[in-house]
Image (cartoon, rainbow, N blue to C red):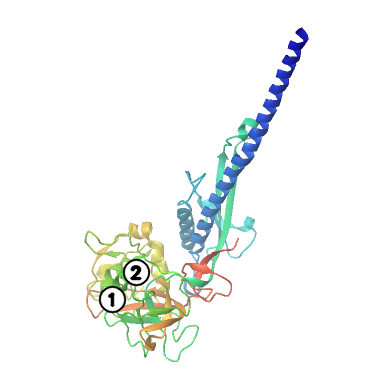
Amino acid sequence: MANHLQERRRQCGAVAIIVGLAMLVMVGMAGLVFDLGRLYVNRSELQTAADACALAAAAELVCDTSVAGSCTSAYLLNAENAGMITAARNKRDFQSIDITISSSDVKFNTVLAPNSTYLSRTGGASAASKFAMCTAHATGIVPWFMGALGAGASNVQAYAVATIGSAQSFCNAAPVGVCMKPASSAPNYGYSLGEWISSNFTSNGNNDNVTGGFKWVDFTPNAGGNNEIRDQLAGSGSVCGIQIGSNVQQPGAQQGAKSAYNTRFGLYPNGANAYTPATAPPDRTGYAYPNKVPGSPVIGIGTSAMSDYISRQQSNTPFISAQYGVSGPGGNISGNVSPASDYKNYGAERRLLTVPIVDCSAGNTVPIVDMGCVLMLNPMSNGANGTIYLEYRGNAASPGSPCRSSGVPGSGGSGPLVPTLVQ
């Protein structure tokens, strides 16, 4: 009997050891499944944030050295801010923790190169950079199961590199189309860099069949009319999937679009349902052309305003009613003028437009011949005789174009520049 009891005691000890070993194996397997899976999920979420950051930052690297002579750090600052703000819209750890990318994790280079050669804005990056790299980090991820086996906290990170390149299909920046000049051809269709293009928002085109001009265009004919055009000018209702060769309609005069057009200059009407800088962002400057004293330099009709516009963006110069509004060349301008802080806090690239080039004389519905880049120079006036000016800044697919769109990139694309991931 005594021997039997001793045998049972020995068996109980063995079972306990087996159960303990089995538990360790189960915890280890759970750790492999859940803890490693959790790290993978965090890595994927970080990758999404890094991709978004790099794309947003690359979209701001549009310095045109042919205009500015040399690029300023303002381009890098805009890119840095755009990347960090865009990344902050993402979360990690099963969408429970905000992702923050610091300024030191947004880096730049003039060429596609090894990651170690990218520099931050404060670390000496070139203001003429064309590639943006973002790195997203997550540190101190404590394991759920592997901690029982002595495993410590883990760190994961993801990075992405983006630049801008030609698109296969793209989204519209504004419902405006430039009329190609008669007997003209690619790439500039009769226009020269810095040339002013004029129109009138009631007649909708100034001698477009003779000297060029621009008109409203509807990317989705018969879909929205004036409301669609107004929404696109205010920054909503963008139409994507556009390609060179796609048809647009010329809908005629759209006077109701004035208030939306002018938001890009930081001019907002009164009313309960009126636009605001938060709902219809302005450009980074509302300074308009042609200007007059006390503006300096004084830029008259036909004189390139691009270089001055770049400097006004850097200082967030607001629209100045005294030098332009009531008695200026564009007639009476209405609306409340935003303070400089609104241009700084809400402003984006809203006056450099990627626009279709069309044959305005070919009928009501015409195909997109190409895409051009233009700078909006002045807001719309109250009267029916106020002239609107755009400055031609070249073909939108040109590598040096200051304009860009959003859309589907691809090798061999002939559309405007769009941000694209390269690494």
Residue 293 makes an appearance in the image: no
Q: Amino acid at mark 1?
A: Gln
The image quarter containing residue 107 is bottom right
Image spot of residue 364 (x, y percent):
35, 84
Q: Quadrant of the N terminus?
A: top right
The image quarter containing residue 197 is bottom left
Residue beneath disc 2:
233
Image spot of residue 418 (x, y percent):
50, 68
Residue beneath disc 1:
254
Q: Quadrant of the C terminus?
A: bottom right
Residue 388 makes an appearance in the image: yes
Q: Earlier in the sequence, mark 2 or mark 1?
A: 2
SS for tag 1?
A: loop
Q: Amino acid at mark 2?
A: Leu
Which residue shows up at 60% across the image and 58% down it? Answer: 118
How far apart are labels 2 and 1 at the CA level? Answer: 12 Å
Residue 105 position (above or below residue 369) = above
The image quarter containing residue 17 is top right
Nearer to us in this view, 371 or 110: 371
Disc 1 crowd rating (10 Å Cα; few below 14, some 14-19, many 20+) is some
Which residue shows up at 45% across the image and 78% down it? Answer: 246
